[in-house]
Structure formats: structure tokens, C-alpha cells
Amino acid sequence: MLGYILRRLISAIPVLVIVAVLVFLMLRFTPGDPAAVIAGDNATSEQIALIRNRLGLDQPILTQFTIWAGNLLTGNLGESFFFKKTIVELISSRIEPTLSLAFATMLIAICVAIPLGVLAAYKHGSWIDRVVMGFSVLGFSVPVFVIGYLMIYLFAITLGWFPVQGYQPLSQGFAGYAQRLVLPALTLSVIYIALIARMTRASVLEVLNEDYIRTARAKGQVERKILFRHALKNAAVPIVTVVGIGIALLIGGVVVTESVFAIPGLGRLTVDAVLARDYPTIQAVILLFSGVYVGINLLIDLAYSLFDPRIRY
Amino acid sequence: MSAEPTILAPVAAEPPASRRRLFGRLLTNPSVAIGGFVLIVMAVIGLLAPVLGTLDPTAINPSTRNRVPGFERTIRADDGSNSTFKHRMGTDSLGRDVFSRVVYGARISLVIAMTVALASVAIGLVIGLVAGYVRWLDGPIMRVMDGLMAIPGILLAIAVVSLFRAGLAAVVVAIIVPEIPRVVRLVRSVVLSVREEPYVEAAIMAGTRVPLLMARHILPNTVAPLIVQGTFIAASAILVEAILSFLGIGIPPETPSWGNIMAEGRNLFRVFPHNILYPGVFLGLTVLAVNMLGDGLRDTLDPKMAGR
């Protein structure tokens, strides 16, 4: 097991290295002179030369990469042009809202989607099944921000249950924090619920035809226990996998949701950085998100043996 | 070479009867029928946009800004006669007719959907064939694809957009790039499984040249999965375009795309929600139709997946 964990950890390194190379090359692929783009339309040639020098663009590309990668490994992500702060500071000041939003969304999605999926599989072909599947396709089809504005319109403006926008740090009290988190998390969870419910249904449906389910029924086991203990447990591996794959959707959704609800998190930072063409920040945020995505999927891979003892490494 | 056709003929072409049956099965699949119908309606709306009672979708009119749906504007013609124009979906904060913009928006979304789907399938197909067939290139190509897939799609699109000047082409490229690795993986896995098949080995033994081998034996096996994949790419392309435009990093704001209409309606959403609701409904309906079409195609072309 330990050997497997090590091997898996090591196998994730090349992927991250390639991401780093791609992200590094991105800036060099910019049509024209990246320094001129960063400097803007009214810059003098001295200003452009200064930026080029600060970015190290006047050096050979391999040297540039070595310096950049070396900095990266020592945790020096560089400095943002636009926000005039080091990127480490910038990211750490923005991380709380994003983490809160992501956790709340996951919590809602898993609590709603798994029972829905199990129910749809159990009542296969009934109206419940059709409603769940219909919702699932619909969830994939409506953009996150439209769902967000519908939620704001319904629950904040019409009913007045929640504030329209904004974020309150946890340190200023839990009530206000939770109240402002409900709508964004609900919004973001829709697509995630659609994804997980669909996979849960498919996976449980397959398991329900197995002999051991019939055996459980034959010995008189309660249906609820058959579904959640026997079926769901054996159907867990694909469900957990899709939760991991869905992290990519979640990250994309965070970017949009934070813009809709004016939450000062990493997603909002990404958009601001792109609008300001703040390349060091864009690179850092992409690296961070990709690292998290790869890391979570690695953890999920390792967790398979918890759900299915037949999987041995 | 002369022996080749006799070996290949039975596997290369499907009998026409089964093809006709497949087409019949497609039309009787409710998802395909409903999704296809909605899409045809949207395409017709887009094509007939100029004659559907629309104004110039980019025409700014400061005197009728932010009007609610159903507002009637009096237009005075050059000869002094008056006529009224009804803004069925109201106007935006620059006085542009939202109905006209939504109707013309169908064009942009459908064009982007088709361009992105065709281009990413074509590019992915070529790279996937190379990776699956040229052994020494397989490793390097797939590592780059793994790297691309490790970057969450929308983030990668945002990054690509930030490299170019804003415009339709930049947006299309930005949506294509994250989709390519998925197509490459699919094509490569098909190639790898097909080249172990006895009939492909037989063809190789018979001395079939690589281009012919690809065209006759390998490509036909990729068609069905690629059609399904292409459909889902089209759905996601419409969504990503809307998201990029909504975030203000998409196609130029005067272009009537559904994402742009909604981006414009953001600031006054509390007072005039129609600027987000109407394009949102059209967009949701279109993507839903494409997704249903994709689900139906997958169920029909790959019966193992039916009902999942």
C-alpha cells in the first residue's frame, strides 16, 4: 500500500511539471511582445524595456524557465503587476472565501445528489426517475450565472431571505458568514448535483442486478438497508471518481459564481487578473487550481481501497 | 495489392439495410427527436433573424433606454408618417432592442457551437490517430494532453483568451484548446483497441499502406463515438462562450451574443431582470436540446450505455 502511494505520488509529478511548462510557455506564446502588452498602449519604450528586464524576457528562454521554476519550488510565485503585492500574499488573502464556497457546495451537492441518485435507480423508470434525470440534464444546460441570478431574484429580491451579494469572513461571526454563503453554494451545487446524481443512479442501477442484492432481499433485509448499505457501498467507486473529476467543474464554477455574488475569492482574482493582463497572477492561479485538481484526484485514487476492499495495491 | 479488396470488402462497408435501420432508430428515439427539433427551430430563428420583426441588433437608441418588455416606441419615418415598434423583450441600457439581439444571438451561439465541435474533433482526431499509431510519439503526446487536462477547462479557456486581443477568433480558439485532449484520448483508445483486431492485423499482413488502413479500418470505428463527443462539445462550447462573454472577456460587447446580452444586463438586474432571463431561457433551451441530442445519439449508437 505504502509503495503504491509513493508510486502514485511520483506519477503525479510529471503531470504537474508539464502544467508548469505549459503555463510558462503561455506567456511566451503571446502574439507580439508580452512586455508591450503588459505596459499598455501609452507606454514609452523605456517603460517597456524596464518591464522586459523585470520579467527576464531579455534572457534566453531556457534560463528564464530555470529561474522561474526555481522560484516556484522555493514558494516564490513572483509579484503581481496590477495589485502591487507578492502573489503569495494576494492568494492567501483570497483563499478563505473560495475554500468556504467550495466546501459548502460539496456538502450540499453530496447530501442532495446521492439520495436522489439512489432513489432514481431504485424507482427505475418511474416518474421520480424521470424527474431526477430531467433535472440532471437541465443542470448541465443552464449556465451557472443564470442559476445565480434566478436564485438572487427569487430568494434575495422577492422573498428577502438572504442578502443579494457579498461575503463576510468567518471571523466576523458565523451567522452572517453562513447567511451570505447559502445562495452562492446552492447556485454552484446545481451542476455538481446533476453530475453526481446521474453517476449515482447509473452505478447503483448496475449493482441492483447483482446476486448479493437478491440474497439480501431473500433473507428479508429492509429495503433501506439494502439500498444504502449493500448497493451504495458497492457502487461507491465510480461515484467517488466522478466527484473528483467534477472538481474541474467546481473550479470553473467558482470563477463565475464569485463574480455573480461579488465574493472576493480566488475566482474573482482570476477574472480581475485576466482583465488587467496580470500574467504572473494568471500563471500562479492556474498552477494553484491545477495542483489542487490533480491532488484531489490523487487522494481519491488512494481512497478507492477504503470503498472497495477488493482493490489492493 | 490485388488481393486486398477481397480481404477488406466484407468489413469495410456496412450493409445499407442496417444503416437505414439505424437512421430509423435515431428518429424514433425521443431525445434525438425533441433535441433535434428544438435545434432546427433555433437554427431557423437564427437564419430568418432579419425578417422576424427585428431591428438592427447593434443600433443604439438613447431615448428609449431600459424599457420593460412590451414597451411601444413610435418611429417617425422620413415622410412624416408615424409607426410604432413594440419592444417585445424591452430594451437594454443603451436602448438596443433585446428581442432583436436575442434572435440574432442564436446565430452566434450556433456558429460557435458548430465551429468548435468540428475543429476540436478534427484536430483531436489527427493528433489521436498519430498518438495511437506512431508508437514513439504516443508517450510525449499523451503527457502533454494529461497536462492540458489537469488544467480545469474554463480556467484554460480564460488563460488562452488572455493571450489574444478580444475577438470571436480568440474565443473560439480558447474554447477549442481545452476540448482537444478529450477527443485525442477517445480516438487513441479506439485506435489502440482496433489495431489488435484480427481484420486489422490481416490487412497489415496483406500489405495495406498506412493511409488506406486508417481510412478503411480505423477511421470508421471512430465515427460513432466522435459524433457523440462532438455533440457534447457543441453544448459546452455554447456555455463557455456565454460564460466568457459574461465575465467580460469574451467577444466584443456590441456583438449580439446571448452571453453579451446577459453581461450587459448584469448591472441593472434588480430592476430589469428581463435582460438576463430572456437570453438565459434561449441559451438554456438550446444547450438542453444539444445535450438531449447527445444523450439520444449515445443511446442509439452505443446500446450498452442506453438509459444511463
Image (cartoon, rainbow, N blue to C red):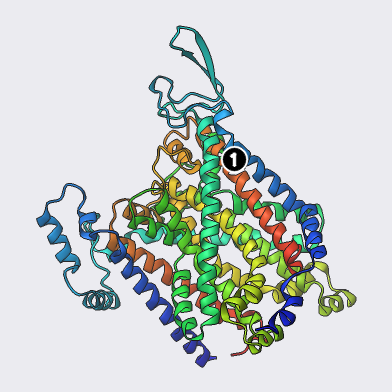
Residue A290 at x, y percent in the picture: 43, 69
- B230 horizontally vs B35: left or right: left
Question: Residue B156, can we see it?
Answer: yes
Q: Residue at x 53, y 71 (%)?
A: B184
Residue B36 at x, y percent in the picture: 69, 48
Q: Residue at x 70, y 75 (%)?
A: A233
**Is residue A312 shown above or below B53?**
below
- A47 horizontally vs A168: left or right: left
Mark count: 1
Q: Residue at x 62, y 78 (%)?
A: B213
Secondary structure of the residue carrying tag 1 is helix
Question: Residue A48 appears in which quarter of the rendering?
Answer: bottom left
Q: Which residue is mark 1?
A: B281
- B29 horizontally vs A108: left or right: right
Residue placed furthest toward the bottom = A3
Residue placed furthest toward the left = A46
Q: Residue at x 24, y 67 (%)?
A: A78
Residue type marked 1: Val
Give the position of the N terminus of chain B as an image quadrant.
bottom right
Question: Residue A151 appears in which quarter of the rendering?
Answer: top right
Give the position of the C terminus of chain B as an image quadrant.
bottom right
Task: Name the residue nearer the viewer: B34 or B114.
Answer: B114
**Is residue B292 shown above or below B199?**
above
Task: Name the residue nearer the viewer: B165 or A83.
Answer: B165
Callout 1 crowding tier (Cα within 10 Å): few <14, some 14–19, many ≥20: some
Question: Residue A82 appears in which quarter of the rendering?
Answer: bottom left
Residue B112 at x, y percent in the picture: 51, 50
Question: Residue A162, can we see it?
Answer: no
